[in-house]
């Protein structure tokens, strides 16, 4: 018998940096009592497991959507004990199929899952993936607000400047959970962000028609991309004034990002660009510097 199973521990002592059920590394976490305290569950190691709040594992365990034996198996593996020993320590009657449970304890790779389990795991990981990408955008936003630019972030942690820029822009277009469509992927949101009207396009992708009524049919990423492209082509002949301004803004942003990237590299090319820009700004008519609409059209 493993004595550690009976060690009395505080919830804080059982804290880990990951969810023992799904592996999520984003906090906060809750220490879950497998046998509830209210039912006489003891404050010992065997009865405690670190579960995530964000991925929903703690709530699912409380509702018994995650089965008791699943948690017992995880604790038995963690404590290098048998499932029977964990049941006994906690004070839960050992179930009749204990032999099958013990096999799962020792055979972690081959734990059989139903098709339903596997499908719900896929959905769960998809949603986690979407959340993580938005979280990255939020973190980039914090860094940008503290004065970092995309090239600096890219130099510090890898990936391209465009990668972090797109994470950031997509987050800015859909900054809150309410503004996002949880059943659509992050890529849907990214495509919608790149249009002049992210909200309209994400609603379309979610299955709303032009009148704002639910059609019940979501678009795939490919369908959304085609719909955006075909509308752009349809309107291609006569872009509206707002679309023209949006396009010019996107171009301005790209140029600005290129300039920032070049400056961060330093050296002679950066010095040359500084000289050229200084001269250009000196020659520029006042109304362009002030951003009058007429001049925007003229330089187009
Ligand atoms: Zn979890």
Image (cartoon, grey):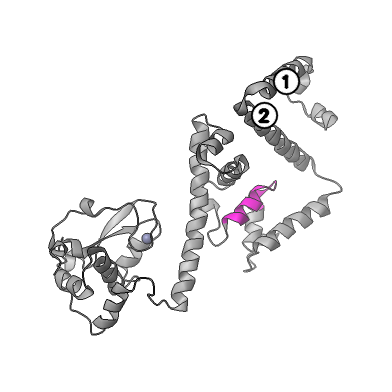
For the residues labelled 1 and 2, the Cα–Cα distance comes to 10 Å
Q: Nearer the viewer, residue 133 or 62?
A: 133
- Could you say where residue 221 lies in the image, as x and y percent from the top left? 65, 61
- In reply to whether residue 198 is colored magenta, the answer given is yes
Closer to the N terminus: mark 1 or mark 2? 2
Q: Residues within 10 Å of mark 1 (few under 14, many from 20)?
A: few
Residue on which the image places disc 1: 277
Q: Is residue 220 above or below residue 146?
A: below
User: How many numbered circles are shown?
Assistant: 2
- Residue 95 as seen in the image, left or right of residue 254: left
- Residue lying at the far right of the rendered structure: 237
Residue appearing at x 70%, y 46% in the figure: 196
- In reply to whether residue 25 is colored magenta, the answer given is no
**Residue contact between numbered discs 1 and 2, judged by CB atoms under 8 Å:** yes
Residue on which the image places disc 2: 259
- The quarter of the displayed image where residue 245 is located: top right
Q: Is residue 139 above or below residue 216?
A: above
- The quarter of the displayed image where residue 253 is located: top right
């Amino acid at each position: 018998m493993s004595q550690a199973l009976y060690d009395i521990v505080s919830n804080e002592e059982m804290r880990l940096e990951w969810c023992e059920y799904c592996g999520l590394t984003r906090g906060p976490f809750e220490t879950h009592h497998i046998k509830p305290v209210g039912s006489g569950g003891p404050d010992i190691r065997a009865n405690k497991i670190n579960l995530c709040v964000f991925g929903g594992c703690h709530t699912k365990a409380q509702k018994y959507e995650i089965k008791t034996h699943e948690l017992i198996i995880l604790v038995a593996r963690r404590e290098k004990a048998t499932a029977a020993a964990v049941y006994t320590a906690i004070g839960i009657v050992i179930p009749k199929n204990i032999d099958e449970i013990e096999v799962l304890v020792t055979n972690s790779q081959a734990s059989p899952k139903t098709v339903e389990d596997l499908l719900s795991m896929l959905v769960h990981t998809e949603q986690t993936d979407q959340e993580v990408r938005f979280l990255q955008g939020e973190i980039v936003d914090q860094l940008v607000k503290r004065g970092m630019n995309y090239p600096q972030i890219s130099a510090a942690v890898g990936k391209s400047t465009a990668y972090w820029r797109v994470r950031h822009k997509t987050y800015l277009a859909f900054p809150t959970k309410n503004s996002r469509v949880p059943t659509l992927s992050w890529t849907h949101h990214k495509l919608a962000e790149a249009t002049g009207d992210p909200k309209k396009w994400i609603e379309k992708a979610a299955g709303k028609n032009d009148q704002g009524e639910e059609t019940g049919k979501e678009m795939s990423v490919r369908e959304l991309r085609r719909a955006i492209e075909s509308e752009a082509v349809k309107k291609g002949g006569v872009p509206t004034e707002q679309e023209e301004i949006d396009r010019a803004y996107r171009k301005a942003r790209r140029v600005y990002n290129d300039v920032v990237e070049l400056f961060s590299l330093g050296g002679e090319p950066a010095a040359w660009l500084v000289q050229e820009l200084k001269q250009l700004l000196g020659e520029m008519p006042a109304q362009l510097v002030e951003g009058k609409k007429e001049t925007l059209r003229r330089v187009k």
